[in-house]
Image (spheres, grey):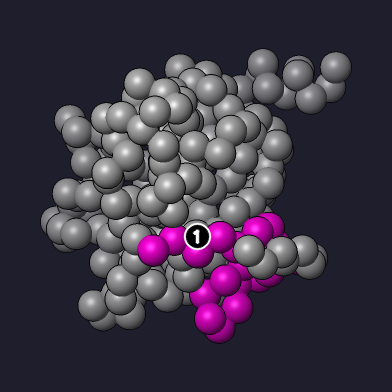
Amino acid sequence: MRLINHQPMLISNAGYANQGVHIPSPNVDARPAHEVSLIVIHNISLPPSQYGGNGIVELFTNQLNPDEHPYYAEIYTRKVSAHFLIRRDGHLIQFVSCLQRAWHAGQSNWQGRERCNDFSVGIELEGSDFEAFELAQYETLKNLITALKLAYPITAITGHSDIAPGRKTDPGDFLTGQKLLLKALNAHDKNNKYFVFMALFSIFPLRLRRKRCR
């Protein structure tokens, strides 16, 4: 396990963020065309709707114990991963280099292109479809997307449910109005370093803004 903690957030030539913790996942392989042009946002919690445990890390590293929770017995054999996980407190964990293919999207299609794992970066937010994300998560997400935009020719940001409709529902409507957020992110000039900041923080739900001010 490798601790990385510097400012500002950047992606190295090897595909690693210079903040957070790196925990290698074995569920990874080579990108067929070395393309990184799409960001896919997910949510995950293990056990479902419970936060702060080791279940997500154990799932992505093939160490999930099927005896620890009934749901684990259903999923422990799955070989999955994501490039990044953002914890509820905003802490960042990276499992896979951005230059490699993580196994996060599954059967998927983005604007007529199938196999989104081939050309996307997967970002998991610790959470569920039924609960708002934390401000700290949005702040880390903003910094991470900014770094990815600087490092790669990202052309779009989308949710898992948009590339696998009918099969997946994450990241859910609590991602500050998912479609509005992603529309704002995609509409801004990618050369403007403030585009993600403005997109994220200009459309926060009022309840989250009030929470921050208390």
- Residue 83 percent coordinates (x, y): 46, 59
Residue at figure coordinates x 71%, y 64% from the top left: 3
The picture quadrant where one finds residue 193 is: bottom right
Q: Label 1, secondary structure: give it.
A: loop
User: Front-most of 159 and 49?
Assistant: 49
- Residue 78 percent coordinates (x, y): 27, 45
90 is within the stretch colored magenta: no
**Disc 1 packing (10 Å; few <14; some 14–19; many ≥20):** many
User: Front-most of 128 and 3?
Assistant: 3
Q: Which residues are magenta?
A: 8-26
Q: Is residue 138 left or right of residue 102?
A: right
Residue at figure coordinates x 51%, y 54% from the top left: 84
In the rendered image, the vertical position of residue 158 relative to residue 194, given as above or below: above
Image quarter of the C terminus: top right
Residue with the mark numbered 1: 95
Label 1 amino acid? Phe
